[in-house]
Image: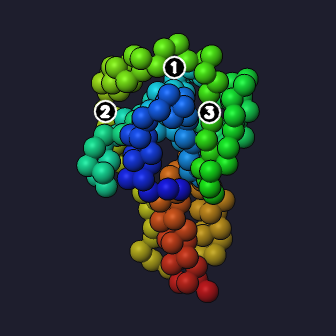
């Protein structure tokens, strides 16, 4: 996935009417995410997505985003929308001009929408408990089978795998 600072630069450069109709989608695991202006376009013209607004330390600003499974892209691509693969994990949807009500008020509408979304609290998910004592191969395999990767972030999955590797090193 692109860096959040690069995504924020893309989302802030909306100088032309054509650029104002573009939705940038970025792959994040098995999902596409749309940020800022692109998220607003998705919510305003495609579907009522659940919007998340989080403070992002790397850009020192709050960012809004929505997401949906990559397998659902056709469901969320309106008729007449041009789809372009910009790069690996970056898809551009250009909404048809007839779909946009008025580009004159878009900036104000986006600002009002952004202000209306509350900042989400980051909830610390409990980390998987790693045993401090030698474990059995069966115990490690059981933990691996019980771990649902779809319920965890990529970072949490990476930490879990690292813990499994440490436990396997103890057993083998």
Query: Mark 1 touching mark 2, by CB under 8 A?
Result: no
Q: Disc 1 or disc 2, which is closer to the eye?
A: 1
Task: Categorize mark 1 by other alpha carbons within 10 Å: few (<14), some (14-19), many (20+).
Answer: some
Q: Mark 1: which secondary structure? A: helix
Q: Mark 2: which secondary structure? A: loop
Task: Categorize mark 3 by other alpha carbons within 10 Å: few (<14), some (14-19), many (20+).
Answer: many
Q: Residue, x 45% and y 70% (percent of image)?
A: 131
Asked whether the viewer can see residue 148, the reply is no
> Sequence order check: which comes first, mark 3 or mark 2?
3
Q: Which residue is mark 3?
A: 94
Task: Categorize mark 2 by other alpha carbons within 10 Å: few (<14), some (14-19), many (20+).
Answer: some
Q: Residue, x 51% and y 78% (percent of image)?
A: 166
Q: Which residue is mark 1?
A: 44
Q: Disc 1 or disc 3, which is closer to the eye?
A: 3
> Sequence order check: which comes first, mark 1 or mark 3?
1
Q: Position of residue 140 (x, y in %)?
A: 60, 70
Q: Which residue is mark 2?
A: 119
| Quadrant for the C terminus in the image | bottom right
Q: Mark 3: which secondary structure? A: strand
Residue 100 against residue 155 in the figure, above or below = above
Q: Disc 3 or disc 2, which is closer to the eye?
A: 3
């Amino acid at each position: 996935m692109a860096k959040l600072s690069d995504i924020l630069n893309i989302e802030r450069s909306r100088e032309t009417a054509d650029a104002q109709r573009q939705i940038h989608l970025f792959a994040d695991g098995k999902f596409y995410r749309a940020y800022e202006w692109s998220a607003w376009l998705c919510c305003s013209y495609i579907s009522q997505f659940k919007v998340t607004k989080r403070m992002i330390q790397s850009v020192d600003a709050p960012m809004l985003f929505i997401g949906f499974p990559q397998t659902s892209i056709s469901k969320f691509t309106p008729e007449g929308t041009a789809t372009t693969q910009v790069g690996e994990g970056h898809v551009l949807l250009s909404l048809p001009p007839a779909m946009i009500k008025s580009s004159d008020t878009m900036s104000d509408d986006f600002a009002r929408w952004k202000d209306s979304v509350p900042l989400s609290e980051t909830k610390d998910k409990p980390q998987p408990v790693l045993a401090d004592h030698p474990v059995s191969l069966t115990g490690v395999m059981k933990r691996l089978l019980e771990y649902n990767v779809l319920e965890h972030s990529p970072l949490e999955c990476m930490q879990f795998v690292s813990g499994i590797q440490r436990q396997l090193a103890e057993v083998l």
